[in-house]
Amino acid sequence: MATLLYRMGSFGAERWRTMLIGWLLALGAVAGVGISFAGTFQDSSSIPGSPAETALTKMDRYWPQPVGTGGQIVFQAPPGHRVTEPELQKSLTKTLDATSRVDGVIGVSNPAEGGEVSEDERTVVAEILFDTKDGDEADATLKAVKDAGAEARGAGFKTVYGGGAYAPHISPFGPAEMIGLGVALAALVITFGSLLAAGLPLITAILGVAGTMLAMMGLASVFNVSDNAPTLAIMLGLAVGIDYALFIVSRHRAQLADGTPVRESIAKATATAGSAVVFAGATVVIALAGLSVAGVPMLTSMGLASAGAVAVAVLMALTLLPALMSMAGRRLVPKPGSRAARQAGRDSAKATLGERWTRGVLRHPLRNLILGTVALIALAVPATQLKLALTDEGSNATTTSSRQAYDMISDAFGPGANGPLVILIEDDDPATLQSTATAVENKLNDTEGIAHVSGVDVAEGKKAARIQVIPTTGPRTQETSDLVSQLRTEMQPIARAHSSYVAVTGLTAVSIDLSSKLGGALIPFAIVVIGLSLLLLMVAFRSIAIPIKATVGFLLSIGAAFGATVAVFQWGWLSGLLGVPSQGPVAGFVPIIVMAVLFGLAMDYEVFLVSAMREDYVHHRNAQAAIIAGARNAARVVTSAAVIMISVFVSFLFSHDIDIMPIAFALAFGVLVDAFLVRMMLVPAVLALLGDRAWWLPRRLDRILPHLDVEGENFHVPDATTTVEHRPSEPVAR
């Protein structure tokens, strides 16, 4: 692989104009296709084949729903008044009539006919259905509906607009993310001591993300792409895109500082550091693509979109980056005697900060190992209280109209009104259908945890009936989830006795099934990830101890990340400072996505740090000295990469997207503890305690395992004639 990468780097360095033009044409073609055939990202919070989803599909056949976006208008009479008063009823009727005439409104329900009046008769809810227009037309319709409520507001009604139509729509990339890029640029400038060198990783990362987003727009017209997929893909694409380019540029500048000619240095950096980038990127891609095994469309689209962004980042680092480095020429050479030259050069007499830190760890390895492990376990303790559920309007910030409508409905009708359940009964015989529905209704009336049971609604043809159930608890609570399980158990004997189909469904039941599926997939996925970690690292480092140590370190990092997420998003610690809009269960897809991404990133840091140590050990066979040499050569790059990733993830935390915020926070915190505590403290301590045993591998296993040259340390220039010197007239960085 290193030889192939050398040739790729050499081609990009020698024919950089061709490479740049080729990439511009490719991006232009992707942009043309993506914009011309742009589709719409979907809210795919469903799980085909689940009991609730199957029943919901059946129910839609008997009670067809018009296609559109749903919304709600909550009317609340002034204190001391009731909506049934003639004057208030008259103004309410006029408002609903005016709303139904708004262009873009398909239909508006009458609360008086639907029975959606609170017990104190102060609050009513009107359901409204919009067509599927996008952009300015949809915004104009929403505004016109609010304007149509002037009659009700004039009569004293408090009107609040909620539901999916009025849910906040957050751009996947905004000002907060730009600040994150600014912090990343600052970290790159500090790392390289050069604005030009710092700009190269940003350019490749941004172009890679842009290409990925344009491709996703086109694919959305053919496939069902989750509306959360673009944000996650952008976040990961920027983070790994900057980091992968950082590793290669760092190696290139170190070689330039040692006197290697520019084009030869580019080819060698692509072959050596590029090999590690391919290994690390492949690990992340495999982990993310593995999310599709769970069989959840939303998770599959998020995983594949993110995997695509990472794959593009690797491709950019191996092809476009060499061309940009060649175009920069000797302007990337650090000025002799400068701080950048001392940092880039590997043979500097002055010890680096990473080397000094590592020497400090090695003075008391056992003590540092115990302290670090105890700290990580303490951080992971809250993870035992992790609760999962899907987000809804109740998860939004209290300043949004959709959350205000949600709270008003909860206060007036009970928390379960925001998450009703439906019992579907199906039978070909109308008489049997009626008797089954009656038995179901009687059972529901005797069940605890139910606030209200509607009458039996029989479909045309009398082959199906449904009963709506309002739980006493909210849709995201464990009590409601337990109620769904209880109802399914209690409905089975009734279904068998009458030979009828009886199922619990509704959007709340679908969400509960989805959360249960995601939670159930977490343990099997973790086992696969752990097995993959052990295998890959065993092949990469020819060791038994290194993979075990790395896997345990990853588990400690993921535990700490989950523990901190529980403390912030469930317990409310620092939630005000971080702008968390609401406290409660974490979205069900968060843990498995965080585990997949953090696994890949943890393996990145393990590869770049330990491979530098192994390279020195292979040449000198001194375990203690190899730890110091690895820290001297790789610690600065690893910590810089971690700082960049953390800044990118934190910037997405302040996007205030309740689905993305816990992912961004968990990844930022996970990278923080993994890079600075696990890799920079626990890894040197464990390796020091193990000594030469850290690099031991049984001979029989060594013969079986394939040889994977991760850092290209066994690489030799395939053909010396391909090395081309730069002209002495090329400018040198000042």
Image (cartoon, rainbow, N blue to C red):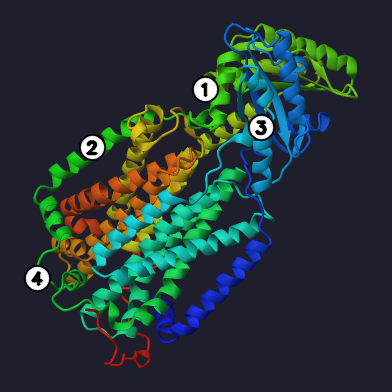
Kind of residue at disc 3: Asp
Q: In the figure, is residue 103 to the left or right of 208?
A: right
- Residue 375: give its label: 2
- Alpha-carbon distance for marks 2 and 3? 56 Å
- Alpha-carbon distance for marks 1 and 3? 35 Å
Q: Identify the residue at horizontal 70%, vertical 8% (top origin).
A: 85
- Alpha-carbon distance for marks 4 and 3? 73 Å
Within-10-Å neighbours for mark 4: few <14, some 14–19, many 20+: few
Q: Which residue is mark 4?
A: 349
Location of the C terminus (image quadrant): bottom left
Residue 601 shows in the view: no
Secondary element type, mark 3: helix
**Is tag 1's residue or tag 3's residue first in the polypeptide sequence?**
3
Secondary element type, mark 4: loop
**Is tag 4's residue or tag 3's residue first in the polypeptide sequence?**
3
From the image, state whether disc 1 or disc 3 is nearer to you: 3
Q: Which residue is mark 1?
A: 477
Kind of residue at disc 2: Ala
Closer to us: 125 or 141: 141
From the image, state whether disc 1 or disc 2 is nearer to you: 1
**Is tag 1's residue or tag 4's residue first in the polypeptide sequence?**
4
Residue 377 at x, y = what percent?
27, 35
- Alpha-carbon distance for marks 1 and 4? 61 Å
Residue 593 shows in the view: yes
